[in-house]
Amino acid sequence: LLEAEKLSSPTEKALANQFLAPGRTPTVASERNSATKMVHMQTKARCTGQMREELLGTPPSHALLWKSARGLPLDERQSAAELDAVLQHHHNLQEKLAEDMLNLARNLKNNSLAAQSIIKQDNQTLSQSMRQADLNFEKLKTESERLEQHTKKSVNWLLWIMLILVSFTFISMILFIRIFPRLR
């Protein structure tokens, strides 16, 4: 701010003043009229006035109205009101964005909690299915062993029964042929 005041032309001063930040942006309504902001606004208004005088070629106007309770000229009051309106607009936008972010965070939390409960249910179902599959595998194994023993036992008996039946049929055919000769 001091270096901007040392510049020679009002145009350079206004340009330098425009790039100067008035300090941090106030977040609470009671901070809106801070000293840094007030000094910045006064310097900006003075530089704007000097530029206007240089452009229009008029001498400094002493007819400014000093109706403000703060002791600011009318031009500075208007720029301060415009600045307050802009700051209020930005503050409202920030509040809206913060509220939107809060809603999005809530939605994300609700979605993650819902996903967590679904995953827990899936894990429980999966573990229950794994237990049931293990139990079924054990039952299948015992039944397979039982069936194998049964098939060995039944094939053994069935084999002997079939062998005896075939032998009996063979012997009876030979006897039948010998007892009953061929008819001519």
Image (cartoon, helix red, strand yellow):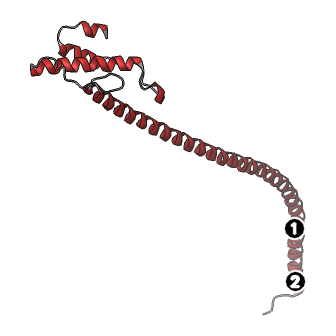
Task: Tell me the residue at 28%/28% (across/down).
Answer: 79
- Could you give the CA–CA distance between mark 1 and mark 2, rounded to whole angstroms? 20 Å
Determine the secondary structure under disc 1. helix
Task: Tell me the residue at 63%/44% (across/down).
Answer: 113
Q: Is residue 122 left or right of residue 96?
A: right
Report which residue position mark 1 lands on: 163
| Upstream in sequence: badge 1 or badge 2 | 1
Tell us which disc is closer to us: 1 or 2: 1
Q: Is residue 92 visible?
A: yes
Q: Is residue 22 visible?
A: no
Residue 89 appears at what percent x and percent y? 37, 36
Residue 106 appears at what percent x and percent y? 57, 42
In the displayed structure, would residue 86 be above or below residue 119?
above
Q: Quadrant of the C terminus?
A: bottom right
Residue 155 appears at what percent x and percent y? 85, 62
Q: Is residue 41 left or right of residue 51?
A: right
Q: Which mark is residue 176?
A: 2
Could you tell me the amino acid type at mark 2?
Phe
Q: Quadrant of the N terminus?
A: top left
